[in-house]
Structures are given as C-alpha cells and as structure tokens.
Amino acid sequence: CHGGAGFYFSDPNPVNIRTAIEFHKALGTNQLVASLITDTLENLQTQIERLVPFFRDGSIAGIHLEGPYLSYARCGAHNATFLRTPNLNEVQSLIEIGDGAISMITIAPELEGALKVISYISKSNVLAAIGHSAGNYDDALKAVDAGASLVTHFSNGMSKLRDGEKTFATALLYESSIPLELIVDGHHVSREDIATIADRASDRIILVTDAMAAAGQPDGNYMIGSLEVEVVSGTARLKSNGALAGSTLTMNRAVENARNFGLSDTLIENAARVLPQKLLDRTR
C-alpha cells in the first residue's frame, strides 16, 4: 500500500512514515510492502533511501516501485508527466540504491524494452510484477514467459474481464498460473468478477489494500503525488477525471469484505497470508 493515517511512504518525515506503518499493523497487516508511485527518478531515489532504514529494522517487508514504467493510457492515479520507457541501467540503479529493500517493481510489459527488464528483475530477488498496462493478450503471455511473477491489482489499470475473450486480463486469468492481486473493497473489482476469479484461480489470489493516505481518515480532499483526490464515502477518486486513486482499505476490512463476498476461509487464508509470504520469501 501507499500509506495511511494521513501520510504517504514518500513523506520526508520519518515520524509520519512510522505513523502510516503502525496504523496498518494495528489493523490486520503483519508484513507491509511500501508502494511508491511514479515520480522523477531523483525523487524516487530519495524516497527509496528514506525507506531503507525501515526495511533494515523490519518495520516493512520491502519497497514496491509502482512506476514510472507504466502505460500512459492506463496510468490511473499516476502523474503521466513522469512516466518513462523501461531502461535496464535505471532499474539496476534503483535496485542498488534500495540495498536489498526493493522487493517488487511493476512494469507495463508492452513498453519498449520491458521484457528485457522484466527478465532481469525476475533474476534479481525482486518480484517482476505487471500492471498499469494497455497491452493485449499476447503481451501478457510474453511477460509471463519473460519472468513476470505477479499481477498488480488485477482488473485495475488494465482490461476488465468483460472487455473480450482474448485480452490482457483473460490471458492472465485463464492462460497463466501467476498470482493475481485483488483490491476487495466493492469498488475496484465487481462481485461478479471476484466470483469468476475465485472460481478459476482460487489459489492464486492475493489480497492487497492499495491504501492511500486517506485510509483511517475522514472523507475530504487529499493528494496522491501531485494529483488532487477527493474521498467520498471512503472511496478515493482523482478530481480531474474520477479515476480510482487507491483505496482506504485496511487488511482486516479486506478480509471481512472477502468473506462477505462469499470467499471461503481457506481461500482467504491463502490470499491474505500464505501466498503473500511465499512471494516475499523469493525476495530474501
């Protein structure tokens, strides 16, 4: 997730970062991966350096770079100004700055050079995730072949299951075996699609919150990076175009929602604890 209790993990004040971590750990999160959104390379490097001490003392399980190597068409609440084409030297540098803390990087696999970078990441004790993609059916399968090991918030920042029989989403659900993150808040993924995903990939679901700073805070106006967000009835959307801008979920609520949506306790246990731990073990 990106933050909570009013703060982001990109915050320059370590006290505020600690507050966000402790907020989530009090509400169902055991191990937390801190997500950083698209920014300039210079700012990302600084943000990574600030989070490394939290990784070293065990407060976070790792850092997730959600950008800047994302699709312009599917960038969601990321500032398109800072999006970049995947570059192996840049990625190597970011991983080196993380000094072991970078556990996951999300890339849109259809971008030029993406498959080479995904292959490198997958061999570097880092989870090569795919998402925020305008790619097609073949792009998804090529990414899996290159080493992609996870889908970032499946069904968001990509095609929906209803968009056709041979799409990025259907390739990952029906033709791959890699884990699929789900934001189960009633807004990001429909109940119908959750039922379909659970029926087809019950052992591949991972519950994530994708929480932004407004988690645990009242409705109102917030920022995500440099973009304005309005939270109404706990749902965060960009003011500019109404796109979802993360969530206000906590993990205990995600588990409760999953149970209310009809998912079994066995599936939930695997999705919230067992499978995430297996993936984290790959990064250590």
Image: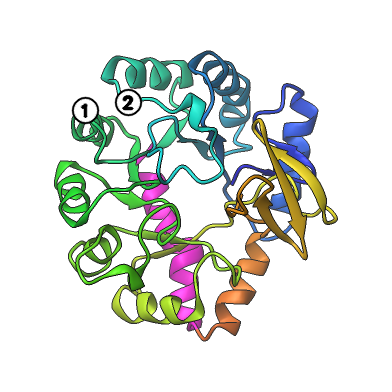
Return the x and y of residue 105 as percentages of the image width and height: 39, 36
Query: Left of 181 or right of it: where is 187?
Result: right
Q: Which numbered circle lies on residue 113?
A: 1
Q: Write the residue at 22% across / 72% down.
A: 165
Query: Left of 283 or right of it: where is 140?
Result: left
Return the x and y of residue 174 as percentages of the image width and height: 22, 70
Whether residue 273 is in magenta: the answer is: yes
Q: What span is colored magenta in the figure?
A: 263-284
Return the x and y of residue 26 as percentages of the image width and height: 75, 55
Q: Residue furthest front?
A: 241
Whether residue 77 is in magenta: the answer is: no
Tell me the kind of residue under disc 2: Thr
Could you say which is closer to the camera, residue 230 or residue 67? 230
The dominant secondary structure in magenta is helix
Q: Residue furthest bottom?
A: 262
Tell me the kind of residue under disc 1: Gly
Q: Which residue is mark 2?
A: 85
Position of residue 205 relative to residue 152, above or below, is below
Q: Residues within 10 Å of mark 2 (few under 14, many from 20)?
A: some
